Image: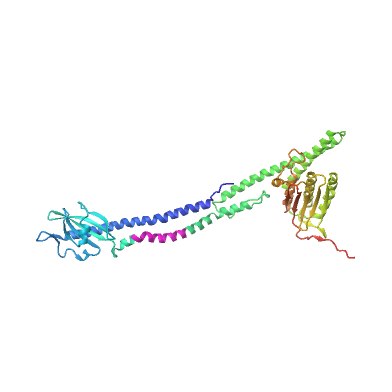
Amino acid sequence: MLPHRRSLLSKIFLLQAAVLCLAALIVPLAINAMLQKRASFFEAKVLTDRARLIAEALAAGPDGKLQLAPGRYSREGESGEFGYAVVEANGTVQLTSSAFAERLLSALGRSDAPKFFSLAADGRQYRAVSFPVTIENRPYWVILGWNLSEEDVIHDDLLRNFLWAALAIAVPLLAVLLALNAMIVKRFFRPVLDVSRRVAALDPARSDARLATADLPAEVLPLAEAFNVALTRVEQSYKVQKEFTADAAHELRTPLAVLDARLQTLPESEARTALLADARLMARIVNQLLDMATLEQEDRAGGETDLLDVSRSVVGDLAIEAIKKGQSLGLVEPEGLTSLRVQAHEQDVWHMLRNLVENAIRHTPAGTTIDVVLGKDGSLTVQDDGPGIPEELHEHIFKRFWRRKRSGGSGAGLGMAIVQRVAQSNGGSITLRSAEGQGTAFIIRLPLASEVEPTPAPVHSR
């Protein structure tokens, strides 16, 4: 059993689906990262500007303590989203907006340059800056905190929900894109599938058949043209082979006929009898080769014949041979019919039936009954009650040059192949029904003549 191979169509679809899924995941992540970076820059700028405003508003009071100069800084933002603490170098808090800000912000680290922090407390998220400032030659740090959990911090809310919102949009969009992608890929490969169906529909019996290329796209056209070129080469090779077979058979017929005539002039002896049998077997094989070559070269379309007449003729000719071998040969005609016309050449039907009857006489023992049975539907059955054919050999019966016993010397194994080819070339078929020990039946089915129905026998009144 051949391993399963994934089609090129499915591979391309899966590849494009993977690319789309990856893009649908990467694009929101990239946008989210970009927005996060921009938001961090925005937060740092807001914190730095606000801390600078506080630093500029700081001044030493009469008691030496720091205070905010009146009118320099609005205290409206000291509660809510912002909070601050002013710390000395030793950590002492000089000024604070609230006890919460003093507890949370004064503990943050300090450095010679603005330093930013992210922290969480009481279920809230904060961003903070430690901003250095010098007042009257003494270092201080304005530590400003921004409560990001406040409702009016719009950009933080947007960032927090952006990724999920983007995925909520991307997933349905991805499904639509995948559906469109499947349709596009299928439409793109439709010409390839059409060509495949045309190739599968080619009749093996017609060597002149070619693929139609008029409506093929440019991408598929070279493949179809190359296939047609290959078919042309096969046809030429097959034609040469058939011509050689026919020529060889023609050339051999005359020498064999002369050989047979000369052998008959020899005195009676066992050697003469054996030589005559061999020469006649060779002549029979040559005639079969010529018949096969003729069938392959000629157009068998058309023709009409009467099965009743041909069957009576063949059975009458071969009855003596059957009797000599101790066999019974009979004809079973459809009741009430005087004519059974089918669409087939008379000579072809004669060859088929004669081959089948001769085959039955040759391969069944004495005492066997052989019947030729005609059906009103145009069927022709040659059956016997001989030893039968094992089921495992059925597939070989119609092969050319196949013989069950190679050493038998009874023929070349062409008879059944000729019968099958003749039946098929006349629009019919042949099937085998047999089992070991249960006899054999070959059933030929030919199309009835289209304009001539089976003629019933005349009814005679008394």
Part of the protein shown in magenta: 160-177
Q: Where is residue 15 shown, x and y percent of the image?
A: 47, 52
Whether the magenta-drawn stretch holds residue 166 is answered as: yes
Q: Which of 165 and 247 is in front in this view?
A: 165
Residue 241 seen? yes
Residue 299 seen? no
Looking at the image, which residue is at 84% across and 61% down? 457
Seen from this angle, which residue lies furthest right?
Answer: 462
**Is residue 34 rendered to the left or right of residue 418?**
left
Kindly indicate the quadrant of the structure image that contains residue 29. Answer: bottom left
Give the image's coloring scheme: rainbow
Q: Where is residue 101 shown, x and y percent of the image?
A: 21, 60
Q: Which of 29 and 294 is in front in this view?
A: 29
Q: Where is residue 164 shown, x and y percent of the image?
A: 38, 60
**Is residue 87 rendered to the left or right of residue 219?**
left
- Image quadrant where one finds the C terminus: bottom right
**Is residue 100 rendered to the left or right of residue 401?**
left
Kindly indicate the quadrant of the structure image that contains residue 135. Answer: bottom left
